Image (cartoon, grey):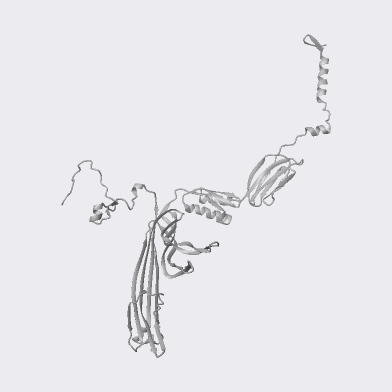
Amino acid sequence: MNCWVSKSRTRFPTSALLLSLVLALLLHAAPAPALAAEDSLAVTSVAAPARTHFMSLGVGKSVIIDLPRETKDVLVADPKIANAVIRSPQRAYIIGAAVGQTNVVFFDAGGQQVASYDIAVKRDLNGVRTTLHQLLPGVQIEGVGDGVVLTGSVSSSVEAQQAGDIAARLVGGGDKVVNSIVVRGRDQVMLKVHVAEVRRDIIKQMGVDLSASMNYGTAVVNFNNSNPFTALGRSLVADNSFSASSVLRGMPTVNATLRAMETAGVIRTLAEPNLTAISGESATFIAGGEFPVPAGYSCDPATHVCTTQISYKKFGISLNFTPVVLSEGRISLRVMTEVSELSNDQAITISQALSSNSTNSIVIPSIRTRRAETTLEIPSGGSMAMAGLIQQQTKQAVNGLPGLDQLPVLGALFRSQDYVNNETELMVLVTPYVVRAVAQKELSRPDDGFAPASDSQSTLLARINRIYGIAAHIDPITGYQGNFGFIID
């Protein structure tokens, strides 16, 4: 039985259709002819390099790398920084050896790049990070090269210092720690200081300058005895206090000068500086001056003229303190105070030649200094006294002619006595306060209420000012309220 398929009125037998289908399948399954060698090289494509990944690794730590395909070789730029080990065709281990940076590249059997990693080996901060999180939750730590960086915020400078100390122990020194911790609401400390010094000087001098001249025929004998006053080093008076002389014909000429002087003096030095500084910062106060001191000579080779170089030294009252608020109302305070003044004791004199006929003398004084330095812990509003800084110096000297100065009564004519007594006492009172900022209207100045006197008051009454002080505040009168005016009981 034959079956016909009709399409556009064309009839094909069923057997012919089946034969055409079989031929088509055979032609499709036949392999394509092989390409020549040069043709295969022309169409071969090179795989693109793998994307580089960044990886942070701790010293002595390792990480497992799963590779996308089989790996045959690995390249490490600096094996001293990190090392790579291939354990299986698609798994490798990277181990951190020292702090630094390097890169690791993996290749397959055909030399194609499989994976690339930039390795930054840092200190292992996991243990320290856990400790800081337990003690100071707001502090973060990150490694940068050989050092670390602290970030975050804390409530006081003491906590910031504690975090810095922990990090310094890790890296082996505070110079490798960058402390960028922010202190929230840093306290301010005002230091009220009283520096008082009292000095008492007593000097007593008495002596006789004796001179005589005797003539024996053609021989002339002169005798001269003057007072050296070695205890003080100088005489209190340059002129003669009392002198007597005898000039008789045929008798020796005798001249006696009595030098006697006693002086007593008291010097009082008082300073009351008030300074305010942020907790953890330093503040300095200086009240005094500077005096010139020669520091060498500078000569012009053309004119051969030399000039003296001058430098200046400071003296006066200085104060330096560094407060740290430990807890509410507790202050750790480091105080250094110094009181210095010019003195003629042990002063030196330098002579400078101005020309061939003239010279100039420069007197360089010495500096007498009292210094105290301490660190203490004190509550806000509490006072501390640094006292007992007492110095007493007594000098006494007797100068005379040997033998004659030991005579009971007449020996006073051949000797001099010099007595010096110096006493100095320094006391420092320190009171710190934890303070807050106030409005400007709540502060006062020393010139508040000051008004200069008029010409008539200055001329007739010798007044300098009319008001000194702050005038009383008077509320404006808005209406009658009870008693008004002067009331006399």
> Across the whole image, how many numbered discs are drawn on residues?
0
Nearest the viewer among 282 and 357 is 357
Mark yes or no: residue 66 visible: no
* Residue 115, percent from left and from top: 69, 41
Residue lying furthest bottom in this view? 217
Nearest the viewer among 320 and 247 is 247
Q: Quadrant of residue 460?
A: bottom left
The correct choice, above or below, for 271 with respect to 478 in the image is below
Q: In which quarter of the image is residue 416?
A: bottom left
Residue lying furthest left in this view? 489
The correct choice, above or below, for 255 with respect to 40 in the image is below
Name the residue at 83% across, 33% down.
37
Name the residue at 81% across, 32% down.
39
* Residue 365, percent from left and from top: 43, 67
Residue 166 falls left or right of residue 199 = right
The correct choice, above or below, for 207 with respect to 46 in the image is below
Nearest the viewer among 423 and 42 is 423
Residue 458 falls left or right of residue 126 = left
Name the residue at 37% across, 68% down.
199
Classify the position of the N terminus by image quarter.
top right
* Residue 121, percent from left and from top: 63, 49
Nearest the viewer among 464 and 278 is 464
Mark yes or no: residue 465 visible: yes
* Residue 312, percent from left and from top: 46, 61
